[in-house]
Amino acid sequence: MLIDGLPRGEAVRAAAAAYAGKHGRLVDLCVAVQQIPAPTGAESERAAWVEERMRAIGLADVERDELDNVYGRVPGLQARPALLVSAHTDTVFPRETDLRLQRFSNGLLRGPGIGDNSTGVAGLLTLAETLVELAPPPVDIWLVANSMEEGLGDLRGMKRVVDRFHADGGAAGAGGRGVLGAALVIEGMGLGRIVHQALGVRRYRTSATAPGGHSWGDFGAASAVHGLVAVAEEIVNLQVPHTPRTSFNIGRIGGGTSINTIAQEAWMELDLRSASPETLIWLDGQVQRIIERRVEAHRVCDDGLTLCHEQIGHRPAGELPFEHPLVQAACTVLHELGIEERSDARISSTDANVPLSRNIPAVCVGLTDGGDVHRLSEWIDPLPLVKGMQQLLYLTWWSAAWLTTHSA
């Protein structure tokens, strides 16, 4: 196996085999996490719960920062380069969402956020329990439950985590913090995927203001809604390449006062993505030119309509070559466990974007099968969790050993 010949490899294999007997406890842990509301930007309740669990497990240097990232360390034989293993705590669902779960006779669990990312957080905590029972790993392993991965959270939690470990040029700080040598990102669903290409994303909010008025009495006055949908029409008619895969989406739009009022204000939110950083820059430029043309046209006709185009999100791109040892190790683990690799899922926008964009080797892996992600009907199949955890433990131990001879 991949870990054969590594220090304490036999003990790691025994710990991995023991997951079969802990399956029920792991499922219960997934449910316990899912029952705690954690909308993006308001993860404090779940973060506090995770912090308490990390302390009970016996991790070193447990603390929570101002963004509700929760840190815990497994001390290694050397402090740096350290390994980061993370899972995001936030979900896409607002606090008032009914979080009741459905359990089916075939074992499936259905409920908002059960897979994304309650199962990932449960996996992180289960990994922590395993690591503290083993002899010290080759390097420090930092386990982090981070905030603000979803939506307009803009990966701010992970950005803060990486900044913390690389402050002051990477000098070691309090608690033995050292430069990150590699990162493993955990998602609850998507067993078999190895994300090693970070999909670049840029997000904008475009707003319009206008004099407005009565739909009959002031007909002809500039309308913020009319002005904004004219911009939207130009954007949706943009032609983007199929290769590299590139997309745009107006995800939200709103404004106006009533059906018989010429709108004084309107807004929309735009999501731009591309597998190529260069193509993303090109697409961004195309949108910017549309805005500039419209701004100039309204200035010339002096109709009082104004446009504001501001960036509200930036998920940086990055890539780890498929031939990199970390990617190859992840593939080997899947093969050894009899898990089929999902070769169609190597590029995505995840917390791994942040370390990859800063040339820190990173991959994102999933723990089990599931579906209906980001829907109230989200579900997971708990049965593959045993193999998912075995994958995570093997890859964690291999990465820690690899870092003793290779740095970022």
Image: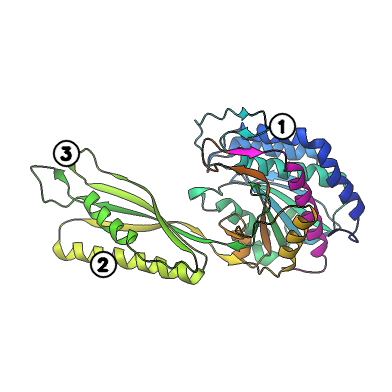
User: Mark 2 belongs to which amino acid?
Assistant: Arg
Going from N to C along the chain, the mark reached first, 1 or 2, is 1
Q: Quadrant of the N terminus?
A: bottom right
Residue 175 pos. (x, y %):
76, 52
Along the viewing direction, whichever of 169 and 287 lies nearer the viewer: 287
User: Could you tell whether 56 is left or right of 353 in the image?
Assistant: right
Residue 174 pos. (x, y %):
74, 54
Assess whether mark 2 and mark 3 are in contact (beta carbons under 8 angstroms).
no
Asked if residue 7 shows in the view, the reply is: yes
Q: Which portion, as a residue range, is magenta?
A: 379-408
- Which residue matches tag 1? 28
Query: Label 3, label 1: how many angstroms apart (C-alpha)?
Result: 54 Å
Asked if residue 47 shows in the view, the reply is: no
Mark 1 secondary-structure assignment: helix
Mark 2 secondary-structure assignment: helix
Mark 3 secondary-structure assignment: loop
Displayed quadrant of residue 364: bottom right
User: Could you tell whether 408 is left or right of 78 in the image?
Assistant: left
Displayed quadrant of residue 43: top right
Residue at position x 53%, y 28% in the image: 98
Mark 2, Cα crowd under 10 Å, few <14 / some 14-19 / many 20+, is: few
Mark 1, Cα crowd under 10 Å, few <14 / some 14-19 / many 20+, is: few
- Which residue matches tag 3? 260
Queried whether the magenta region covers residue 225, the answer comes back as no
Displayed quadrant of residue 400: bottom right
User: Mark 1 belongs to which amino acid?
Assistant: Asp
Query: Label 1, label 2: how many angstroms apart (C-alpha)?
Result: 56 Å
Going from N to C along the chain, the mark reached first, 3 or 2, is 3
Residue 7 pos. (x, y %):
90, 58
- Which residue matches tag 2? 293
Residue at position x 82%, y 65% in the image: 404
